[in-house]
Image (cartoon, rainbow, N blue to C red):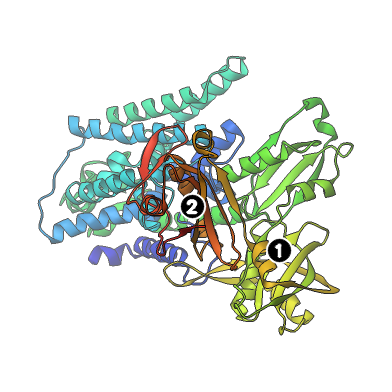
Amino acid sequence: MKNMKKNWFRHLIQWGTLLAIIIILTKMFGNETADPEAYCPFGGIQTLATYLVAGSMACSMTATQIMMGIVLAIGVILFSKLFCGYLCPLGWATEQLAKLRKKLKVKEIVINYGTIADKLLRLLKYVLLFWIFYTTVSSSELFCKNFDPYYAAATGFKGELTMWMAVLAIAVFILGNFFIKMFWCKYLCPLGALSNIFKYAITFAVLVGIFALVNLAGLAVSWVYLLAAASIIGYLWEVLYLEVKVFPLLKVVRSTEKCNDCGICAKKCPYGIDVDKVGAVKNVDCNLCGECIASCNQDALTFGGKKSLRWLPAILTFVLFGVAFWLGSTMELPTIDERWGDEANHSQLEKARVEGLRSVKCYGSSMAFAATLKKIPGVYGVATFVKHSNVDIYFNPAEVTEEKIRELIYIPSKFKIATPPKDVQNIKVITIFTEKMYDRMDPNYLGLQFRNTGKGYYGLETEYSCPLTVRLYMDMDEPVDEKFFKEMVEMKELEMLVHGGGTNIVKVDFEYIGISDVVDTISRREFLIRQFTTFSVPFKSNQEEWAGKNEAVYELVYPDLDKPLITRNLPFLSNHLSQIPGFISIETLVNENDEYCFRITYSKDALDDDKIWEVLNRSKWTIKNREGVMEEVDPKFSFKEMGATK
């Protein structure tokens, strides 16, 4: 507690960072998304490397993370590992586990500096660094998410992770740090390895210079060699010297005149550095946390040899990462920026910006969007900006117009707001026109706006036009209130209920243009059919043997077949049935009683109602995966009422 008071600025930043993380993850103030890696400098440096090598950005990373990474590198080179000492949540947790061990009076496992164990363990973080960067740059997806303890904990083990890796990493993190002082930071943290490479800045600069000169000379040397050289030499420098030579410029300095050699500073150092035995702390592990200075009652320790610089590292941390946040929020780099076709014609291309494409939100969806554009004659390039959901499309105006491109990339959508009561015979249909609703998710958001009113609205569907055509299905008794429609369309925030309780705030920016004078009506059945997305799969391998052989149709009513969370599992069911002799096809539809149902065509020579029911309710489904290998999976549907052959 005494040290905490004397080093209050550092602890204020640490606890403030933890509070900010909690606010972001719990969406305490209704923020739209909870991204645990929104300000991750390590992800930013991986993204920068991916951008320099492949011209794309890793996953959903943006300029904000890149600026955080650049500032981290500058901070390490000029000052020290400020992020590690003041902002890293894993570094904070590491120190807390050591304090817990002391309180519980559990004996520490000591690994002294320079021992064989120390040197071998330090290799691990460089192996991880190489593995992570190689995989990330090669795939444009952040590989570290698979096992990062912070990411796993922050997402509640629900993120883009590999469960066994994440569980193992958490276990190693807790047990390792509990018994061994700063175990994760010294031996396993890939960001720690990268920061140490930056501490040997001159060596790193020489490696980059050699790599650049060799490639400029015409020798196409892969970036992998630079990564390998930096990892290997960084490790060798760390275990052979352990101390930095020139950088960072700011160090803890000990006054031999004032020091009484009590050794308290070394005991209080989280890393156990022998601060009391050196004139200036050059140990590669030092992150200028200031715990040694706070523990010294002789004022023998200072930053840079000046007492006036006591809070400089904390101030620099605050300023540097504040600047990074500001710069990242004012600029944006494309997640992908691709051109195709004849390069000689690229100078003639025009650019069309399409805004609000929320579905283009990462590298994978950016590449999928690019694949769609490559099918459009006259389109020869795209740049995606996932932070603000915008894309720039490059096209030849002599071959295709901007209007035609917008039409071809638009995906008509429908959204069911509510199921009309059974006593409703007819439904009113009106048409409104909107702008800024060209993403496939936008009709869902507008539909949710209407659902939240609790009024008699049943569904909507869209059709491409300029402005966009939106057909709204409503109860016959619901008034056609244009003012109300305008309010619904132009609401700036949508409150979405999330699984497990609570709400998620989605910011929207739709624009209401007008309403058609035409009011139409359709029957309840026609509405159900129009809103229902059918699914139909013939089992080709089974058809050759069983088609036409005593065929029959088994019908099974399933009320939730209109829900996307249910229908996305239909391929699993069809795959499972196709592996069993006698099943010929499956489809979903609205039956003559206006009920959602499965219709399974089968051969009575192989199956009957009881057998079909048994197959549907097996504890494990047998499916064939993409590699053609048979595997067992948990059932994706729960069937309660038995169907029957019609």
Q: Nearer the viewer, residue 305 or 60?
A: 60
What is the tally of numbered marks visible in this picture? 2
Q: Nearer the viewer, residue 13 or 392?
A: 392
Question: Which percent across, then down, holds residue 148?
Answer: 37, 47
Q: Quadrant of residue 627?
A: top left
| Residue holding disc 2 | 569
Q: What amino acid type should be assigned to the residue bearing mark 2?
A: Asn
Residue 15 horizontal side relative to residue 482, left or right: left
The image shows residue 259, relative to residue 142, as above or below, that is below
Callout 1: few (<14), some (14-19), or many (20+) C-alpha neighbours within 10 Å?
many
* Residue at far right of view: 398
| Residue beneath the point at 54% across and 45% down | 66
Residue 216 in sight from this viewpoint = yes
| Residue holding disc 1 | 461
Residue 201 horizontal side relative to residue 561, left or right: left
Residue 309 in sight from this viewpoint = no
Q: Quadrant of residue 610?
A: bottom left
Helix, strand or loop status at disc 1 = strand
Q: Quadrant of residue 146?
A: top left
